[in-house]
Amino acid sequence: MFTVMKSAPSRHRLKALGALALLAASVAGVQAQETKRLRVADSFPTGHYLSRLLLQPWMAEVTKRTDGKIQFDYFPGQQLGKAADMLTLTQNGVADIGYVAPGYVSDKMATSEVAMLPGAFNTSCEGTAAYWKVARTGLVQKLDYAPNKIKLLLTVLLPPYQIMTTGKPVASIEDIKGVKLRTTGGAQDLTIRALGGVPVRMAAPDAYESLSRGTIDGMVFPLDSVTSYNLEKLLKHSTQNANFSSFVIAYSISDAAWAKLDPKVQQIMQDAAETVVKEACAAVDKQDSETRTKLQQAGIAFKMLDAPTLEKFNGVLSGVADQWAQGLDSRNKQGSAVLKEFRETLAAQNKK
């Protein structure tokens, strides 16, 4: 219902209407203040499956559960900065929430690499559940996240990485010797060196150019990311059933930005993450086998390693975890303790 005013208003009514207008403007201002927009940045190209499965559902759920009071401005494709700079951009407030991949800043988040060691787990959901716990309430939170003044919001670990090449296939350890392979650094460097290869550290967005120029001969990479970066045009071969490490996908918020949020909003964000993280890892596991079929159709040949060959690989790689832990111990980073906690967390959840 509303009333249509047909006659000219009196002076008193004009004053009353003016007061109402001021009140309405004030209320609108308060409502505008209650709606908060957060900047989210990552290095993934538009439409990347990890953004689609992890980040975007979470943002939509948070906006829904807050009745639109929390909204997001999403900047993909390194619009706000390079992948290796996301930690700094998040700390400095350029992004409120950033894709802070520990593997790209291993000098500052070294203990997170416990989840990137070869043979650590067999599926995305196994690794995700273990890291989700130790990075929020365990030693990884204490040693990686707290000192950097950031808080983990979302994570998913990728299925075991394979070695993919532009030249000859990898059918044995000898086939890796001297081969230049893209890695994310840290634990993956140790893995490739143990096998006799030459690790070349770089972020995923730089891989296409490096492959096309011959700067690298191949890469340690997840299958699902191949098509996102159009790498199927360059790669020819891949192992199929090996376990050469993984990678932690993680979105974090700075402690400063987190402190500015209402406690109710904080709880909503955490509750939404609990649901989305579980759904995302399950989707990643399912998509891994589907992607292999698509890559085969695109011309990439997959090599199934036989049992004796796998045993040789696993034998060489079995010492990488201890080497990694001892390296951190020598820097007072509690590597052995972190490795023990992560393995115990994995074992405990596998018993459930």
Image (spheres, helix red, strand yellow):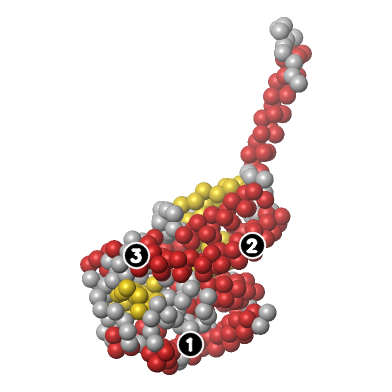
Q: Residue at x 38, y 84 (%)?
A: 305
Q: Residue at x 70, y 34 (%)?
A: 27
Where does the N terminus fall, quadrant-wise? top right
Indicate left or right for 102 with 133 as reference. left
Labels 2 and 3: the sequence-earlier one: 2
Helix, strand or loop at label 3? It is helix
Badge 1 local density, few (<14 within 10 Å), some, or many (20+)?
many
Labels 3 and 1: the sequence-earlier one: 3
Measured in 3D between alpha carbons, the distance from the residue under mark 3 to the one under mark 1, in whole angstroms, is: 35 Å
Query: Which is more toward the observer, 92 or 215?
Result: 215
Helix, strand or loop at label 1? It is helix
Labels 1 and 2: the sequence-earlier one: 2
Badge 3 local density, few (<14 within 10 Å), some, or many (20+)?
few
Closer to the eye: label 1 or 2: 2
Query: Which is more toward the observer, 328 or 352?
Result: 352
Q: Residue at x 39, y 60 (%)?
A: 228
Where residue 19 sits in the image (x, y, percent)?
Answer: 73, 23
Q: Which residue is mark 3?
A: 297
Where does the C terminus fall, quadrant-wise? bottom right
Amino acid of disc 1: Ala
Q: Which residue is mark 1?
A: 321
Tell me how many marks there are.
3
Helix, strand or loop at label 2? It is helix
Where residue 93 sits in the image (x, y, percent)?
Answer: 52, 56
